[in-house]
Amino acid sequence: MKKYLKTDEWNIIEDNFHAEYQRMSESIFSLGNGRFGQRGNFEEPYHSDSYRGSFVAGITFLDKTRVGWWKNGFPQFYTRIPNAADWSRISLRLIDEELDLAQWDVDSFNRRLDMKEGVSYRDVEVTSPRGNKLSIHVEHITNMAHPNLCHIKYSVTSINYTGRVSLVPIIDGHIVDDTEYPNEKIWNILRSGATGECAYLWTQTRREDAQVCYAMTYQFLKNNKETIANPIRIEKEKQVGFSIGTDIKPGDTITLIKYTAILSSLYYERQDLIDVSIAEAQKAKAIGWDTLLNNHCQAWKDIWDEADIVIQGDPEAQQGLRYNIFQLYQTYRGDDPRLNIGPKGFTGEKYGGNTYWNTELCCVPFFLLSTSKKIAKNLLIYRYNQLPKAIENAKKLGFNNGAALFPQVTNNGEECHSEWEITFEEIHRNNIIVYAIAQHATLTGTLDYIAKYGLEVMIAVSRFWSQRVSFSQPKQKYVILGVTGPNEYENNIDNNWYTNFSCIRCLTTTLSYLELIARKYPDEYARVRRVTNLNQVEESDHWKDIIVRMYLPEDTEHGIFIQNDGYMDKVLKSVDAIPMEERPINQHWSWDRILRSCYIKQSDVLLGLYLYYFSFDTETIRRNFEFYEPMTVHESSLSPHIHSILAARIGEVEKAYQLFIHATRLDLDDYNNETDQGLHITSMPGSWLAIVRGFAGLQIRGDVLSLSPVIPEKWDSYSFKINYLENTLSIHVGKNIEISLITGTELNIDVYQNVYILKQGVNLEIKKKDVVNKG
């Protein structure tokens, strides 16, 4: 772990310059607004170890798939989000020197990310090689209220320098991708130019013709008074901007405010991009910094009013939790069903910015519970719109009759992953989509989405399973062969318990909703039967047979479910047997050694017990947790929060807390030694879920919201809001439990297995149960 950031409940602070952690800091201080985002790079050039990254939502590049051994079903192209033009560049030049923190002396340094208001600050005092001393203050905003805009206020104060100083705001189209093939040309420059006080750069991706246009203008002030400068226009093919200079003496301050508009062909007609982007930049200047900042801060206030969890007594946990919520909302606005959430968001190129099953596991439940907005529905519609491609993906692998296999990795619905053990074997991802659809119905209390969209997906996924299972004559059971479960440290195994059990749940869920929709939405039911060509009697009979006769590996002696066939033949050791210098094992061991070991990247069995909790009693969860947790290395970002939730449910409160901290500060403390590559955006809501689903014990039993709160010893209290059946509840857990209904009229709620009627305007106070910690 790396602990160089200060602990503060609302801020991320680096109060000394740590050049050795520069790439990690660039990830940590990333900014975004759901339409675009960038790593926390310095505005000025930095000629040392650095990874500059700027990304625009929905703009992708078709990268040719490169594999040594081609297999039928592999995609021809790998779709990824490309590194885009750098719109944040501002150089600082003296007469014959240019600021570069890698070459100048850094006398003091502080950068701060204000999560409450969404502003990045940087203060640095420097001395040039010629002895000139300057103080620099930077404020950087990626505007949440105006999603086309980014603004930077860059101020320079002379300490001992007398002479000419120039600030050079540019848009830089010299793009180097931090990928395996950095020299591949991705972008064409269609046009660039600078007129008056506005410069623009119009770009286009090769192959797909996705286009982005950037336009910038500026204000220039000296000692807080706007100054008319005679800028030098910079007009190159790949770089546009201005050089604005003036003479200063010690004590003088000059300030440049850079207003940048970033527009893409996802939202605007290509022929209009230049004119509209220039108009947007000029409009931003007319509105002015103060108003733009106020609008941006109000947008963040609205987010925090819904999604914040307040922890009393643990600033480190509070900081990490807010950071995760902050970065998730910077990545995804939830207003466009064409977009999804890349595992790295706008913080890095790893995973190509594509959609993984992480979205349905972590992000959909978070948005369903934390906001009344239709964000989760848009994520589900994203998958529905890609159903034809999912059917096409399955057809390539030999499935028929409308069976669908949703891709492991995608941007447009087509599978773009090309590792056999993942692309063709990690098929459990199909089930989490059906699970998320069912969660939407459970938590919103409406079947409208399922009737109009979800049932088609459920039928297609169930058809996949009906063809993917095999019937074992020796076992007289259905089996699922040749898969990889969520634990990617075992490949090509048979009868993965999680895959088999979630197949049962998928088929059961589909059958249940077929009956409900037939009864309550007969017209939609008739439409779905028609478009899917459903033979309900025949297909349902087969699905029911699979449900009844599915093989589920278990060890009756230990009272546990077996991860998969052959797992118990391994040498079973706890992670304590691994020397610390060999962790993470995926960065030190050979793949062969990992596959033969008992060590688990994330536990398949425990994931199933978390998702389908209503099927298992507490003792079953306890036995499996105590068996698998000691062998889990948590080298998947999806792992710690799942384990934390289960630990809380079985009364292992302090163990749950340790795992919660791991999940919450995964990137801030760099648990897996990879924060420099970008953040784990799609697992970040797991820390929020660890409190709500774990410590607060939120479950849905039948149609009743159930809570069984516990509290870590270190905390004085914790408070949060949730949405359930279009009701908003405020919950406070401290010495006692206080629950109030903020919106809604009346709701039944179960607390410690006692049902109460919750009414608006009447606070419910319940004595907190003392839970004996077994951790």
Image (tube, grey):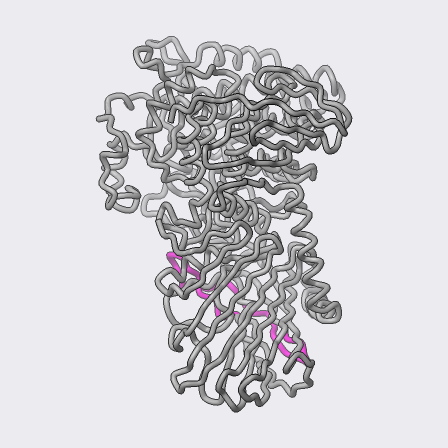
Q: Is residue 657 above or below residue 539?
A: below
Picture residue at 40% right of the left edge, 11% below the top: 477
Quadrant where the C terminus sits is top left
In the depicted view, which residue is nearer to us: 110 or 773? 773
* Residue 30 picture location, percent across and down: 51, 57
Q: Is residue 726 above or below residue 680?
A: above
Q: Is residue 753 left or right of residue 757?
A: left
Question: In the rendered image, which quarter is residue 121 located in?
Answer: bottom right
Picture residue at 48% right of the left edge, 14% below the top: 546
Residues in magenta?
Answer: 173-199
Picture residue at 53% right of the left edge, 21% below the top: 769
Q: Is residue 677 left or right of residue 79?
A: left
* Residue 713 picture location, percent across and down: 45, 33
- Confirm whether the magenta stretch covers residue 668: no
Q: Is residue 152 above or below residue 561?
A: below
- Confirm whether the magenta stretch covers residue 183: yes
Residue 183 seen in the current view: no
In the depicted view, which residue is nearer to us: 751 or 246? 751
Residue 605 seen in the current view: yes
Picture residue at 53% right of the left edge, 34% below the top: 689
Question: In the rendered image, which quarter is residue 397 located in?
Answer: top left
* Residue 57 picture location, percent across and down: 58, 53
Q: Farthest residue to the front: give it.
A: 735
Total marks in image: 0
* Residue 71 picture location, percent across and down: 37, 39
Q: Is residue 233 left or right of residue 582?
A: right
Q: Is residue 159 above or below residue 76?
A: below
